[in-house]
Image: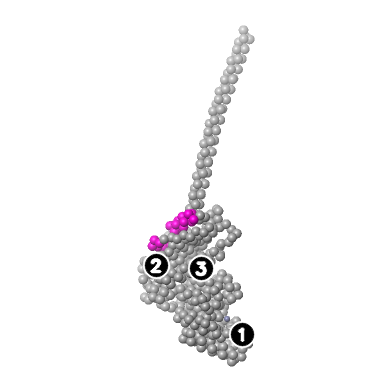
């Protein structure tokens, strides 16, 4: 009996154990199923998140890219909406020219004189070429987008303003970056169409007035966002306040990228209300004005009159309200007397560079005199006035030469080597890389296309950096207080 009971008890216990095990297995199965579901949900959520992120990134990237024509059009219209618009601009159409490597978008109005339009187009062409040469290379996978925003304003002050702004973006597979942001401004006489310098339109006190307003405006508006050292770029000095445009009721001053604000913010435009500048406006636009206290540079061109290249140089000087000194070769004058007349009418100075470019140290006194006199005569016939400055061919001279020629004789302080390199960028760099240009005499030759190309880079650059261009005689007068003296050699002018 006991044994049977034991057996039964055993069986029951076994059943209980089996039961317990079964229910444990059941629970375990359920738990595992739950865990699986949870895992699946987690995976789904994770996948979703990944998809969303990828979606967002590609969407974001799509708006910031320009690898296809459609992308580029969207990019350009966004750039105009958000970034490039520095000033109130009447609604003008945007033109997009897509290219896999270098796309260009342009917004501008055609309501301006033919002269301004032709200068504007040339300038845009030369800047575009500069960017292409500087950045495009076949070995990288970058594509570029150049965004132009150009406007012309008639101000009623006697000066029309042309503002040309360009932004260059580069895209590789990861990101789009702003490579360059540049604004240039030009003033034109409403009456003559010629380029004007700021001080032909505004009084010398204009920088103080503008600076006072700009500094307090920037402090209020940007505070801590101002870049350390920003004060240097807003002090009332020549180079800081020569980029401006008359625009409606404001004068808009432009400050380059990476000066007042961080580079990523691009160029900064500050509207100064006209009423603040009222006392600074000249009653009448002056056809020429030299500020004795501002830095000045004399550009000189030898070996002309040149042909088309010299015409281009004159176009560039004229549109920038700039002048130069041209040392002509008498023997060439009759081939192109019109450019001499045009240069002199513009305020440029004619110079004597001998009849046919001999080495003067190898000539007799008589030969020297003949070289000079024949050239004086030819130039006077072409433009109505005799040259008052002389430059010996090759710069080759000695005391005998200087005494015999008996005119103020000029060498140079910046040798661009344009005749040797025939490379516009190198010629430009030879000027740009000089630390102090005030009082410099720049040597170029007006007979090369590359020199005309370089002039189109140098002259706007000088303007932008606060340099006035003057003739050699003006440079001597302003720097020494005396008119140039006959029989004197000027190597540098201080
Ligand atoms: Zn020469």
Q: Is residue 86 magenta?
A: yes
Query: Residue furthest toward the bottom?
Result: 366
- Residue 190 placed where, x, y %? 39, 73
Q: Residue at x 52, y 46 (%)?
A: 54
Asked if residue 14 can be seen in this view, the reply is: yes
Q: Residue at x 51, y 55 (%)?
A: 68
The local crowd at label 3, few if under 14, some if 14 to 19, many if 20 or more residues have their Cα within 10 Å, is some
Q: Earlier in the sequence, mark 1 or mark 3?
A: 3
- Residue situated in front as seen by the camera: 282 or 231: 282
Between the residue at mark 1 and the residue at mark 3, the CA separation in whole angstroms equals 37 Å
Q: Earlier in the sequence, mark 2 or mark 3?
A: 2
Element assignment for label 3: helix
Asked if residue 472 can be seen in this view, the reply is: no
**CB at disc 3 and ligand 1 closer than 8 Å:** no
Q: Residue at x 46, y 59 (%)?
A: 96
| Disc assigned to residue 359 | 1
The residue labelled by disc 3 is: 126
Q: Nearer the viewer, mark 2 or mark 1?
A: 2
**Can you say whether 352 is above or below 86 in the image?**
below
- Residue situated in front as seen by the camera: 481 or 19: 19
The residue labelled by disc 2 is: 111
**Can you say whether 299 is above or below 221 in the image?**
below
Q: Which residues are magenta?
A: 69-92
Q: Quadrant of the N terminus?
A: top right
Q: Earlier in the sequence, mark 2 or mark 1?
A: 2
Q: Are marks 2 and 1 in contact (CB under 8 Å)?
A: no
Between the residue at mark 2 and the residue at mark 3, the CA separation in whole angstroms equals 22 Å
Query: Residue furthest toward the top?
Result: 1
- Residue 182 placed where, x, y %? 49, 64
| Disc assigned to residue 269 | none
- Residue situated in front as seen by the camera: 300 or 124: 124
- Residue situated in front as seen by the camera: 226 or 202: 202
């Amino acid at each position: 009996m006991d044994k049977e009971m034991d057996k039964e008890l055993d069986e029951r216990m076994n059943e209980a154990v089996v039961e317990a095990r079964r229910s444990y297995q059941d629970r375990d199965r359920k738990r595992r199923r739950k865990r699986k579901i949870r895992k699946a949900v987690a995976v789904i959520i994770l996948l979703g998140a990944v998809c969303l992120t990828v979606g967002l990134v590609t969407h974001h990237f799509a708006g910031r890219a320009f690898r296809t024509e459609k992308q580029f059009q969207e990019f350009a219209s966004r750039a105009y909406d958000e970034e490039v618009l520095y000033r109130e601009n009447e609604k003008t159409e945007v033109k997009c020219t897509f290219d896999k490597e270098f796309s260009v978008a342009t917004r501008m109005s055609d309501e301006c004189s033919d002269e301004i339009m032709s200068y504007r187009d040339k300038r845009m062409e030369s800047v575009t070429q500069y960017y292409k040469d500087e950045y495009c290379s076949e070995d990288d996978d970058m594509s570029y987008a150049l965004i132009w925003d150009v406007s012309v304003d008639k101000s009623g002050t006697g000066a029309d303003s042309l503002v040309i702004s360009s932004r260059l973006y580069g895209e590789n597979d990861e990101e789009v970056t702003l490579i360059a942001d540049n604004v240039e401004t030009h003033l034109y006489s409403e009456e003559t169409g010629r380029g004007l310098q700021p001080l032909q339109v505004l009084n010398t006190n204009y920088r103080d007035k503008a600076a006072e307003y700009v500094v307090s405006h920037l402090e209020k508006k940007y505070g801590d966002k101002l870049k350390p050292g920003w004060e240097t770029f807003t002090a009332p000095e020549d180079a800081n306040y020569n980029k401006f445009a008359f625009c409606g009721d404001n004068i808009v001053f432009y400050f380059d990228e990476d000066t007042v604000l961080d580079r990523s913010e691009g160029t900064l435009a500050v509207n100064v209300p006209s009423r603040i500048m009222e006392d600074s406006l000249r009653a009448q636009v002056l056809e020429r004005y030299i500020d004795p206290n501002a830095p000045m540079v004399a550009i000189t061109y030898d070996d002309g009159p040149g042909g088309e290249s010299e015409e281009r140089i004159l176009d560039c000087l004229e549109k920038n309200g700039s002048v130069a000194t041209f040392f002509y070769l008498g023997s060439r004058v009759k081939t192109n007397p019109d450019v001499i007349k045009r240069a002199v009418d513009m305020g440029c100075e004619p110079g004597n560079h001998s009849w046919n470019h001999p080495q003067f140290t190898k000539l007799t006194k008589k030969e020297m005199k003949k070289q000079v006199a024949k050239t004086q005569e030819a130039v006077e016939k072409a433009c109505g006035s005799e040259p008052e400055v002389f430059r010996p061919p090759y710069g080759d001279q000695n005391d005998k030469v200087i005494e015999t020629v008996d005119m103020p004789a000029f060498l140079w302080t910046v040798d661009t080597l344009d005749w040797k390199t025939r490379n516009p960028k190198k010629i430009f760099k030879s000027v740009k890389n000089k630390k102090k240009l005030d009082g410099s005499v720049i040597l170029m030759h007006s007979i090369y296309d590359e020199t005309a190309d370089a002039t189109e880079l140098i002259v706007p650059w000088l303007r932008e950096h606060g340099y006035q261009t003057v003739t050699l005689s003006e440079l001597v007068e302003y720097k020494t207080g005396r008119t140039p003296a006959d029989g004197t050699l000027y190597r540098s002018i201080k």
